[in-house]
């Protein structure tokens, strides 16, 4: 009987330890909610925003709803592939895609409505990049021209509704861009269909 009691006690202790470990592991992660900031999350978990940035290999304080952050523990080992996936430019695309279907509004620069340059301005701002709200033509003049675009670079077009640079989108890879065009924010091919004959080049800001 004593042996059985000891075994039951040992099993209960093991279960408690396992439950505690699982709970601790769960508590190490936090899913970002709308309105959160790194500073606010750090206060809630008794840490610093710098520590959270280090744990998650963040290069800016920009975060977005639905993002899962490690808020305590040791920095996780990050593979080269994972680092490539979580680069700031990839985060720009994640943010941009959140607004797919948002209606086109001339002069718009918020989720209630975007025009092409307003969309670029808003997405870049949300990703932590400080740029001025200006026109497609101005973004073109300020950008570094590149022939081999990277994800997150800008794509420029000329002579659509006016002479000169008249449209800008964000390059998402595979020959496609996301931009506010037509009636909404949408993904379209760059060098085929409507945009092919208006394509001007790529720029990096």
Image (cartoon, grey):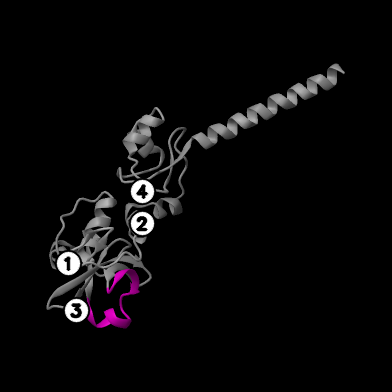
The circle drawn on residue 112 is none
Q: CA distance from mark 3 to mark 1?
A: 12 Å
First-in-chain label (1 vs 2): 2
How many numbered discs? 4
Q: Earlier in the sequence, mark 3 or mark 1?
A: 1
123 left or right of 29 in image: left
State the separation of the CA atoms marked 3 and 4.
Answer: 33 Å
**Label 2 SS:** helix
Indicate left or right for 102 with 141 as reference: right
- Image coordinates of residue 147 in percent, x first then y, are 25, 70
Q: Secondary structure at mark 3?
A: loop
Marks 1 and 2, how far apart at CA: 22 Å
Q: What residue span does the magenta drawing correspond to?
A: 182-199
Furthest residue toward front: 112
> Mark 2 sits on what residue?
90
- Sequence-first disc among 2 and 3: 2
User: Is the residue marked by circle 1 packed among few (<14), some (14-19), or many (20+) residues within 10 Å?
Assistant: many
Q: Disc 2 or 4, which lies upstream in sequence?
A: 4
The quarter holding residue 187 reads bottom left
Crowdedness near tag 4: few (<14), some (14–19) or many (≥20) residues, C-alpha within 10 Å: some
Residue drawn where x is 56% and y is 33% of the image: 23
Q: Quadrant of the N terminus?
A: top right
The numbered dot on residue 64 is 4
The reply to whether residue 114 is visible in this rendering is yes
Which disc number belongs to residue 136? Answer: 1
Which mark's residue is nearer the viewer, 2 or 4? 4
Q: Secondary structure at mark 4?
A: loop
Q: CA distance from mark 2 to mark 4?
A: 13 Å
Which residue bears the numbered disc 3?
160
* Residue furthest to the right: 1
- Whether residue 199 sits left or right of residue 74 in the image: it is left
């Amino acid at each position: 009987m004593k042996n059985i009691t000891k075994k039951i006690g040992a099993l209960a202790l093991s279960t408690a330890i396992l439950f505690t470990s699982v709970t601790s592991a769960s508590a190490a992660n936090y899913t970002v909610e709308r309105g959160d900031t790194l500073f606010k999350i750090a206060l809630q978990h008794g840490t610093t925003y710098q520590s959270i940035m280090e744990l998650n290999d963040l290069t800016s304080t920009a975060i977005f709803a639905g993002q899962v952050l490690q808020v305590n523990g040791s920095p996780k080992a990050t593979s080269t592939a994972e680092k490539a996936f979580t680069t700031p430019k990839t985060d720009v695309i994640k943010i941009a895609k959140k607004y797919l279907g948002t209606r086109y509004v001339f002069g718009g620069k918020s989720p209630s409505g975007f025009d092409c340059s307003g969309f670029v301005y808003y997405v870049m701002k949300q990703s932590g990049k400080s740029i001025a709200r200006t026109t497609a033509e101005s973004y073109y003049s300020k950008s570094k021209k590149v022939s081999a675009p990277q994800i997150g670079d800008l794509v420029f077009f000329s002579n659509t509704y006016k002479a000169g640079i008249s449209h800008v989108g964000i390059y998402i890879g595979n020959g496609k861009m996301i931009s506010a065009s037509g009636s909404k924010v949408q993904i379209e091919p760059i060098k085929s269909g409507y945009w092919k004959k208006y394509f001007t080049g790529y720029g990096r800001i």
